[in-house]
Amino acid sequence: MRRFDPLFTEADLLELWQSTIGIERETLRIKEDGQIAKTPHSSHWGDRAYHPYIQTDFAESQLEFITPPAKDSQEVMAWLAAIHQIAAQENDQQAEWMWPYSTPPAVPTDGKLKVAQLSNPADVHYREHLAKFYGVDVQLLSGIHYNFQINPRVLANKISPDADAIAVTNKIYAKLGRNYLRYRWILTYLLGAAPFVPGTYQTKLYGKPSQQPMRSVRLSRYGYMNDPKVKIRYDQFEHFVDDLEQAVEDGLLSEEKELYADVRFKQSKPVRKLMERGIDYIELRNFDLNPFAPYGISQEDIDFVKLFVITLILLPDVHSQEAVDQGNQLNLAIAEADPLAPHQQDNEVGWFFQEMKYLTQIIDQELQTNYLELVEAKERQMSQPEQTLAGRLHQLYQDQAGMVEHGLAMAKDHQEVYLERPYLLHGFEALEISTQDVIKEAIRLGLEVEIIDPAENLIKLQHQDHFEYIRKGNMTAYDSLISYFLMENKVATKKILENAGIHTPRSENFSQIELAKAYYPSIQDKAFVIKPKSTNYGLGISIFNQGASREDYEAGLKVAFKEDKEVLIEEFIEGTEYRFYVQGDEVKAICQRQPAHVIGDGQHTVDQLIDQENQHPLRGPQHKAPMTLLAKGDIERMQLHQQGLDFNSIPDPDQIVYLRRNTNVSTGGISIDRTDDTDPSYKDLAVKASQALGAFFCGVDLIIPDRTVPADQSKYGIIEANFNPAMMIHRFVGRGQVRYLGLEVIKALFPELKMTDNEHTTFPA
Amino acid sequence: MRRFDPLFTEADLLELWQSTIGIERETLRIKEDGQIAKTPHSSHWGDRAYHPYIQTDFAESQLEFITPPAKDSQEVMAWLAAIHQIAAQENDQQAEWMWPYSTPPAVPTDGKLKVAQLSNPADVHYREHLAKFYGVDVQLLSGIHYNFQINPRVLANKISPDADAIAVTNKIYAKLGRNYLRYRWILTYLLGAAPFVPGTYQTKLYGKPSQQPMRSVRLSRYGYMNDPKVKIRYDQFEHFVDDLEQAVEDGLLSEEKELYADVRFKQSKPVRKLMERGIDYIELRNFDLNPFAPYGISQEDIDFVKLFVITLILLPDVHSQEAVDQGNQLNLAIAEADPLAPHQQDNEVGWFFQEMKYLTQIIDQELQTNYLELVEAKERQMSQPEQTLAGRLHQLYQDQAGMVEHGLAMAKDHQEVYLERPYLLHGFEALEISTQDVIKEAIRLGLEVEIIDPAENLIKLQHQDHFEYIRKGNMTAYDSLISYFLMENKVATKKILENAGIHTPRSENFSQIELAKAYYPSIQDKAFVIKPKSTNYGLGISIFNQGASREDYEAGLKVAFKEDKEVLIEEFIEGTEYRFYVQGDEVKAICQRQPAHVIGDGQHTVDQLIDQENQHPLRGPQHKAPMTLLAKGDIERMQLHQQGLDFNSIPDPDQIVYLRRNTNVSTGGISIDRTDDTDPSYKDLAVKASQALGAFFCGVDLIIPDRTVPADQSKYGIIEANFNPAMMIHRFVGRGQVRYLGLEVIKALFPELKMTDNEHTTFPA
């Protein structure tokens, strides 16, 4: 690198690369005809008074999505994907899409556009002021804000022991701001993407633009512009603070935040506080929505901007206000120019990209990455305007009508992206599906989510000062440590349930085969199971439905003792097994597992019924979907054969045709919800069992001969109680009602959310 | 077997072998001069109103120990060992022993013997009635009660579907009672062991016995005897109930329990209730204390009696009252006979032992045991009275004075057995030592203890209706499941502690070596540690006390990345590491670990100082004692050499001479209690850390430069928080005060015990 800010060296590069990024993305909710939606911000999303991810910007229909700070572009993309998916699943209910451009498809001329209906009256009032002063139209512009926090370690290393740490921090950020304003035109040239506005569009300050295309109306004088009398100096940070205060004092701005600048210094308010507390991060605002990118910005562009900003940090300070003014003029000219017009700054571009490539090469070499290719592609675009975003759009259409047509097509495509694989949480697919479900509900409701350890599925949810940790979907502070060990220990579980007066299948534990043999008279004419104390895949288990001969009994013992030193002989209860999902003092779900099967209608063949069943939106390839596609293989053929059927048979109406014997999901088995048609006495039992074990979240397995007959008239048995009970078997059911157990976890942990109208999830089953 | 009760077959034998046994053992507390102790029953033991293990019988100084029902003699012995140890450790405080004979060493003639001072006035009144009616002397007799519960499965198998289950059960027990009364003389012959009583001893009914030795004064007419007018029939269970009620009605007995019979049917009271509810178990009472056995009965004799009882169950019913009367006469004659007098029942003994050996052989064959040897030895004693217990005693002394002398010698020997290895819980040595400690305190305080799973160290403690489960000493219902996982995860722990405003050593996590290299400027001149995220035995750790050169730094990274994909670079805090044991909102103990060392006195050599230190009662061979003996090996020699010393050097007064560098207990390291001389600000911090993690029991590791300087003036750091914190490092300390953390666990779990005067454990450090 030829030029360098004297404060920095090349050695800072990798530490700078570990700086933090956050993205804010705005978008208009639209109807399929391109009109701006008039529906209110959904009440299914948590209150905008605290929602950290889903907000509104100016208009009630102008969504603003905010990602939490992230270490890299992959993490940012994951959050963007998740938030878009969650918002889109709700929008889908109202047949609404997200408009992919920074300029609106239409401007409401009936004056009925509502500003965001926030709960704080001052927030509404501010928006009404903006509408009055600048006009409604300009406020409908949407964009990307790119938040960048310099790795605090780099800053700390630049502060000598006797220096004023805050002053140094502010100085470094102020310099970055200046440099950014000076060179940001390069980004506007590459990424500007708002060529047209509707014909009626106008601003109070500059009136109507021409209908000639430009790189970005949003970044032109017809975009966000303050009164030209607002003059803010950036040459020294103190000037910036003074000038901004003065502009408010002079009534040119109603509030400090009304300053429409492409750079904002965050975090303290008012601006003077930054002098005491220091700047926390910088907000860069001159990014149009990329209409090709479902999330408004591509991962490549997030990385490119990061490299761009780091280059600016390492470059010498442009220092003067003249340089800033020059940058502003360049940027405005580039924004207002024809998308295919070349720039006139070959020299500047030449050396700037030289520096950037030099730094990129070092990163690539150290981290085994390939960002150079990305930078070189952008460099090529500097002399090929037709390859820039605006240039590409210009080749697709030449007027506003064309832009709307293209925008609607992209909105539709993007909606399909948001809605695909609806059972997963986009961006977080590597987590357990139950953890994804909890996070999805938490984001929707506006809880802050932190992934503490993805490998452990350990997350933290927070609402204001109240936080809770959750592991694997439902292991929380509500369950006690000892109940976990009690449930892990089947002998202890049984003892405790029996002490609580709950019927568990009678069982005896033997460690000597001769003693087990002597037990024969006690069970010879009963139904029982012989099983090794610990068993894998059912090895060593013998089931005797109606007693056993001594010979068979002893053979069963031999097999079991081969697998384990301890063997259980357990009463066998005739009936169907149900899983009761207990949370606190309530059974939230009951399900029954069934092997892969189809149900006849008297008209279609088994083959056709399988094809129909495979249309189920939850069915997909093994391990890739909540339910597995039904197969037509040899095992299914044999199973049909045993029932006197083949794939061409036409089963009777309501005839259940089994394709498998095992209930595993991976071979097409399903769960059937039985929550509402099971006698309540069994629910009481399950809760009693859970409480006897001191559990809060508990999966209780009951065998019940007839679930409509009350427990006191039935020969039921509790066979197991499980900590961390599976949630997804109730969330994704083959038949019956879906049970949103992720939401239930949140309701238990955050009762203060008082979910009145947003308690029902809108996520598809 | 030639004769069989028609109800049973040989196939019942192994099931009968799995019947349940419990032992009650009485003993007089005595002083070393052989006088009965006049001290009250210790208030350190839990209240006799509920104590399940340590009670008093007739006199305040007459201890009664009760074991819970057990499946085999080994388990019974474990309980006897534990209860004796716990009682003896308290007795030891008052220089008291346990008298090993059934007849007292002396009878208080001053009338000052106190009956048991129980809290229920009716209980005291009953004892005063006994003293008045039968005399005090006879009430001082002590014995063993052997409780036997027939395996309920055997009973269940004998009950046909239309039979009255309770009637069948009572019939079987009543028959066992009859047979026992008929043949118990054999046990009295073999195990009678109370040849003399003090010269002043007398009974109200029969006056003074002669001073001639007999097998058992306790079982003679001078022992427990009701008024001869009390006639109880055993030929039918209904007769037994009628006669006992009649005796009370006639005023011959004050209560049903006043019946001094060698057989009692338990459990319901009054006796008539047995007809409704059924007999639960049978109590056999004609066992003298075996003075050779520290616990009053040997394991062999427990097994022998079990075989004897099972034989009686399988033998035909003796049916008639005449047979019972004959048995009573035989038993009385045997008890009152000279210890060396032969019996006259060769025929009966012959066939009886034939039957018993036949059954024993089957058991031995099926279960790979060797009980036959035991039965054959007893059989030989039937014709060798000098080998019986009474016979053996007769060879040791011939008068009461000799018996007292022998009794005192045995009492002293037994006391040594009880007091050996005081840091373990006798009988439960296979459990973790912390679990042993909790159980020991629980038994002392009178909580019911159940070992749910020994391999898991999972136990249940119960007081009345309130029960708690404990795993590994302090994992309980008080700790939450999620806090366990949070503490398991060091990254999560750190995040949470930092959020709570607690200083943890600053650390950064790297998964790429190049990024870790780039971090160099941030730590180059600081003290820091490089360590793999997961490490075993310190592999891959580099410590830099005062910064590092870039070369050394990168070498350290390489070593660490060899061990793990993730590497932590952590601030190194200068100071001493302390372990804070937090329970709820209190720090119950603080300790510091030190390597093996001795402290000079200016007079003795290192060699001599080591010998002195090895006298510490907690020191013993590696893994066999709470602290390990100091060694004088090559490592110690080298360590001394580094300090310019050898084994013959005489260190200065107070000079600390290290023999090792590592603090491990297994190489002589010790812990030093620092609970009372650490600034309270650190205790507040440890509690805060534990609470931030949602923990109840938590071990917090702090590094502190000077523990007397408050935290706000100190550069301390919390380096770790641990669930299930070690208790024994505070319980067994090399220097400083012992912290009884097992007791603290119980106090937390059972606040209702309101431990006022018995909260301080009397167990030795």
Image (spheres, coloured by chain):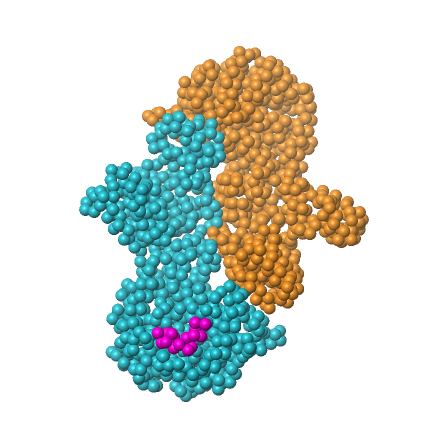
Chain colours: A orange, B cyan
Q: Is residue A183 above or below residue A440?
A: above
Q: Residue at x 75, y 53 (%)?
A: A642
Q: Is residue A534 above or below residue A446?
A: below
Q: Tell me where residue A376 appears, x and y as whole percent.
A: 57, 19
Query: In the shown orientation, is residue A316 left or right of residue A707?
Result: left
B590 or B389: nearer the eye?
Answer: B389
Q: Nearer the viewer, residue A44 or B65?
A: B65
Residue B263 in view (yes/no): yes
Q: Main secondary structure of the magenta part?
A: helix
Q: With respect to residue B51, does B498 lie above or below?
A: above
Q: Quadrant of residue A393?
A: top right
The percent position of residue A4, horizontal first and vertical second, equals 44, 17
Q: Which region shows up in magenta?
A: B376-392
- Taking the magenta stretch, the answer to whether it contains residue B13 is no
Q: Residue at x 48, y 30 (%)?
A: B512
Seen at 47% across and 55% down, the residue is B455
- Write the residue at 26% across / 42% down: B657
Q: Is residue B377 magenta?
A: yes
